[in-house]
Image (cartoon, rainbow, N blue to C red):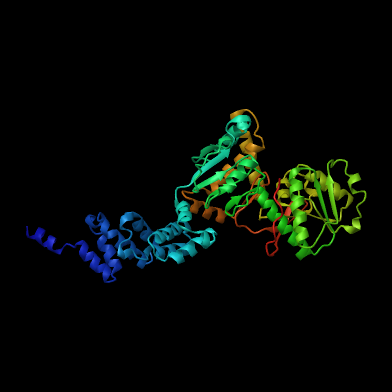
Amino acid sequence: MIKILLSFLLSLSARDLIKQFNEGKYETFLKNFYSERKFLQDKTLYPYTAVAYLNIWKTDSALKYYQLIPNANKKDKILEGFAYKLAGELKREGKLKDALTLYYDSYQMGSFSEEVLQEISMMLNISPSTLNDSVLYYLFDTAEVVLVFPFSGDFADLGEEFVNAFKMEYRGPFRKVNEENLTNDIRPNCILIGPLKKSTATSIDSSYILPTIWFLPYSTYIPFSEGFIYSPYKCILEEASYLVNYLVDSLRVQNIALIIDTSWIEGFFAKNFKTMLAQRGKFLRYEIKIDDPFNFLPYFESVDSEKIDIAVIPGLSGNAYPIYSAFRTLFPSKKVIGTSAWLSKILQLPKHMLNLDVVSVQVSESYLIKSADQLESFRKKFFQTYEYLPSEIGDLAFEIGYLLEQIMDKNLAGVLLNMNSLKSYYSPKGYCYNFMDKLFIIRIREGNILQIGGFEYEEGEQGEQGE
């Protein structure tokens, strides 16, 4: 009986532990916290435990106990400034997703609001002026994947192929929205993929709200809205702008020949390339448009080889290699430069023939081989499942599904963080989605990537929209 009474008199209370904490005896506090089950189950001690761990620089444990604190108790005076301080430590340790969540907690609690907005802005590559309460709410709300495509009417079969191909790569949940009957239930916490039609894209663009992440793998429409909008055609404009500045400022060439076919995509490149060139006070020496690359001699009859310093052959169409081969046959010593689309052709063409420079994000030959194998594997699996080979619609759905598997997270803040870490995505079909990567001049010699060189310049104006 005496032993029991003595044990009771000597036992510590929560008040004793808090006293040790207030005296700065953090390790003693933690030792006693773990000494009895009653303390481990006492949630009123969790704020002190989290702060104690942070004060001895054990950030993982600090985060663990902070996450156990009920939201209603996170405004406890003892936690004042805690989320902001722990976020900074986690950011320094490279634990960016946890740091982002804590910065948002700090903002919600009204602590260091201006500093928090600057931190989130830098981490997600967002202008601080756009970060208001609404944008922040949707950035940290649960993310949703929304597919906008025709799921009824004349193009319903394309919608079906799109979904079938997409879900073979993307394993998460998604919601379908029929672009034939577009409703207004797309919230800004979504990753939007599609649509097929330019008219639908125009409608979505007119009501676009940050921080929606929008991928347009099919529509040739390039949105006017500023935001997280990614399109292969937008990347073509970026490459054209870089190419113009490279030719004018670095190579300082005077005599430029642009050689294209009659496809829409090469016409789109040509129109914008010429506009950008004119904005720099330069004009083409020759523009040669070829509709029959296998009967090329008539197109070059009036061309003086002495008046060509470099030929721009974009490489965007299926006729790219015959056009390139024709030019090389007639002008073997002339330099050729094009877009990143050429990289996807390296594995398809006779290596000894391919000698040119391209503008691209950084891509290795091993990556090209791997991505080509992934596309081929997908096509075989699709054929085995649906008994027909996927069209271009199916191939692009596979590419977007594969990309989403790499970047998907619980909220858009996490998705954007993953995208910034990835920097860019060069797809097996040769389409580029540039998130925050630099462009380079990549030299291809005998079909091999030999050298990657940077070229710095101030971003030029983009050209006109495509039809």
Q: Quadrant of the C terminus?
A: top right
Figure check: 418 above or below 262: below
Q: Quadrant of the N terminus?
A: bottom left
Name the residue: 89% across, 58% down.
307
Residue 169 screen position, x and y as percent = 56, 40
Q: Of 56 and 392, which appears nearest the observer?
A: 392
Residue 320 screen position, x and y as percent = 78, 45
In the drawing, does residue 12 fall left or right of residue 320?
left
The single residue placed furthest to the left in the displayed view is 1
Tell me if residue 69 can be seen: no
Name the residue: 60% across, 57% down.
436
Name the residue: 57% across, 33% down.
151
Q: Of 446 and 403, which appears nearest the observer?
A: 403
Residue 187 screen position, x and y as percent = 49, 46
Tell me if residue 63 can be seen: yes
Residue 257 screen position, x and y as percent = 83, 54
In the drawing, does residue 353 fall left or right of residue 226?
right
